[in-house]
Image (cartoon, rainbow, N blue to C red):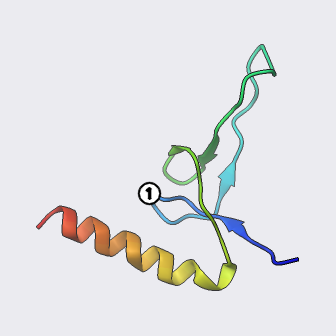
Amino acid sequence: MDKYIKICPQCGSTDIGVPKAGMDLRFTIPDHCRNCDFQGIFPEIDPSGIDRFRKEIENHKEDKFK
């Protein structure tokens, strides 16, 4: 089985966690990035692709400000 790692689509961090549960555990609790506090859905990628993913994020940010 291949191993994949969650990565933040906003900052490229792999330090992803699940927020502490609230009163009712029946609700879905989104993952969150411990680096930038982004919450939502995180892509899972092969660890060998982390650098490429981070470069894509930087390129996208640069294109956004042009």
For the residue carrying disc 1, how many other residues have a C-alpha within 10 Å: few (<14), some (14-19), or many (20+)? some
Question: What residue is rendered at 49% in x and 83% in y?
Answer: 52
Asked which secondary structure carries label 1, the reply is: loop
Residue 29, image x, y percentages: 69, 32
In the depicted structure, whether residue 30 falls above or below residue 26: below
Residue 54, image x, y percentages: 46, 74
Residue occupied by mark 1? 10
Asked whether, in this view, residue 38 is left or right of residue 2, the answer is left
Inspect the image, locate mark 1, and give the three-letter code of the amino acid beneath it: Gln
Residue 1, image x, y percentages: 88, 77
Picture quadrant of residue 39:
top right
Q: Who is closer to the viewer here, 15 or 9?
A: 9
Asked whether, in this view, residue 65 is left or right of residue 45, the answer is left
Residue at far left of view: 66
Question: What residue is rendered at 74% in x and 71% in y?
Answer: 4
In the depicted structure, whether residue 66 falls above or below residue 18: below
Picture quadrant of residue 14:
bottom right
In the depicted structure, whether residue 16 falls above or below residue 61: above
Question: What residue is rendered at 50% in x and 66% in y?
Answer: 12
